[in-house]
Every structure is written in structure tokens, then in C-alpha cells.
Image (tube, grey):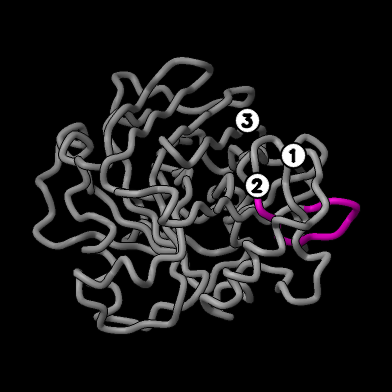
Amino acid sequence: MKIATFTHGGRRRIGVVEGDEIADVTTTDKVPTDMIALLSAGPAALDELRRAAARAPRLALADVHLDAPVPHPPKFLAIGLNYAGHVAETGRDAPQFPVFFNKQTSCVTGPYDPIHRPRVSQALDYEGELAFVIGRRCRHVPKERAHEVIAGYLICHDVSVRDWQFKAQTMTLGKSFDTHGPLGPWLTTPDEVGNPHDLQLSTYVNGERRQHARTSQLIHDCFDQVALLSTVCTLEPGDVISTGTPEGVAGAMKPPKWLVPGDVVRIEIEKLGHVENVVVEEPADTDLV
């Protein structure tokens, strides 16, 4: 299944994407109206979702606004330097231990929403990544059972403000600006994905391909990451984990090709679809004082 969070008629809910339509499954009282509630309800809720999709009214995808599949994840974790090509282009040594960091959940935005170039920096960069969502509460998950706790896969655009990333002592600040976490376009369940470690990933800026790799090149794959993270903390339904970016980022070019307003970034991953975000200047109405 392809499970989406969408807004239509001023109301946000979940639906099942089939071709160029979405089944509005929340017309039945038996299906939760948001992704975290759905995942928390367990396998029975997913079975009911499948049944509801068969009889639910359809809406054209073009007539709805697709939101991030998990608009407010409990945790949004990511890993750095997880493709050998990206390690090489940064000029660094491969880390001896996986480099994890938080993206603050307030950065999450929809798969086709604009991203802001912040007022405080022009060093705006793209990173196309495979991400996955945790489907049930778990701790100390062995690698061979990690697939059991993954609800599905999606695309993450790990937008990065490089000067803030490097001047802070951790990467969190440079990775957490508002709008810098587009997710989507929907959550694709594992049965439709097959092997998550053999998918093609491509990132385009204004139609020019900048990144091209297969997820088989991940240094630490999805299951490695579940095993390690669940050793440290309890993973919960709706947690998003992004698995790192391949080579081809703007900051590694000479000179860097930073994103500027008007640029369009499109990230495609085989079997998952695409996200596409236009860069805009941070608007004045972001002030909340």
C-alpha cells in the first residue's frame, strides 16, 4: 500500500494512493485519521485500512494537498557520511562509528512544499535520501528482526545549511531550519518495496542530475540502523529515520553550487515516487515575536 496524509476541504486525514487517485479511507469510523494513530493500532488497523480502501470514495490526487506522511514524528533521526562516495567528496575519513544526529521535528514539511533559503545563510544544500518509518514500539531489536518494526519507506530531502552545520558542535542546527525536512510523497509498505537495499536514487536540480546511486551502496543499511538506535532508545510508531545521502551535494562542488530562490529540487527513488521542492526566500511572516 501507499499510505498518504493529505488535506482536502480544510481537513487533514489519511488515504490510500492508487494510481492518480486517493481513497479517502477515513470516511469509515474504523480507520484512524492520522498516521501515528494508524501505526500505533497495529496490524489489525492496517488490515482494516486495506478493506476500507476497496470501498472508500476516490479523490483525484491533483485535487488534494499531500502533506508529510508523518507530519509530527516523535523523533526525526538521520545519519551522516553513510555512502563511500559522499565520504570521499567531503575529504574526511570514514567514521569509525555511525554518525547520527537529530533533525528537529518542526522542520518537517510536505513532499511538494517550498523550502526556505534562511535569512542568516546562503549556503543552502540538498541531500536526497531513503528514509523509513517505525511501525511499533521497540527496543533492543536484533538486525535480523529489524524488518519487523519498519512500517514503510519514503523519501527524505535532508536540506542542509552548511555553514551552520559546521560552525555548531553538532549537525543539528544546520539540519533543522523550518521547511528543511520534506518527506513523502507517501509511506510505501514493505511488501511493495521488496528489498530496500537495492533501490535507485537520483536528485535533480533544475533538471540537472546531481546525485545518482543505489541503496545497495549504504555503509550502514536500514536494518543496521534500527539495531543500533534501538540499543540506545525506545523507537516508537511514527519515528522517522533517514539513511544518508550519496555523493553529488552542492557543497562539494568547486565552487559550491548552493541552492538559490527559484531552484527546483526533485528527488526520485525507485518504487517510492518523488518529492519536488522549489526554493524561496524565507518570508517575512515567519516572525513569531
Q: Is residue 174 visible?
A: no
Q: Magenta stretch: dominant SS?
A: strand
In the displayed structure, does residue 10 sit left or right of residue 263? right
Magenta range is 7-17
- Please tell me how many numbered marks the rendered image carries: 3
Dot 1 or dot 2: first in sequence order is 2
In this view, which residue lies farthest toward the right? 9
Q: Position of residue 170 (x, y in %)?
A: 33, 61
Amino acid type at mark 2: Val
Graded by Cα atoms within 10 Å as few (under 14), some (14 to 19) or many (20 or more), the crowding at tag 1 reads some
Name the residue that disc number 2 marks: 17
> Toward the viewer: 141 or 123?
141
Q: Is residue 92 visible?
A: yes
Residue at image coords 74%, 52%: 23
In the displayed structure, does residue 45 sit left or right of residue 174? right
Q: Quadrant of residue 88?
A: top left
> Toward the viewer: 259 or 36?
36
Query: Does 222 appear above or below 199?
Result: below
- Tell me how far mark 1 sits from mark 3, CA to CA: 19 Å
Q: Quadrant of residue 73?
A: bottom right
Name the residue that disc number 1 marks: 61
Q: Which mark is residue 278?
A: 3
Q: Quadrant of residue 45?
A: bottom right
Residue at image coords 28%, 52%: 80
In the displayed structure, does residue 16 sit left or right of residue 135? right
Amino acid type at mark 3: Val
Q: Position of residue 12 (x, y in %)?
A: 79, 60
Dot 3 or dot 2: first in sequence order is 2
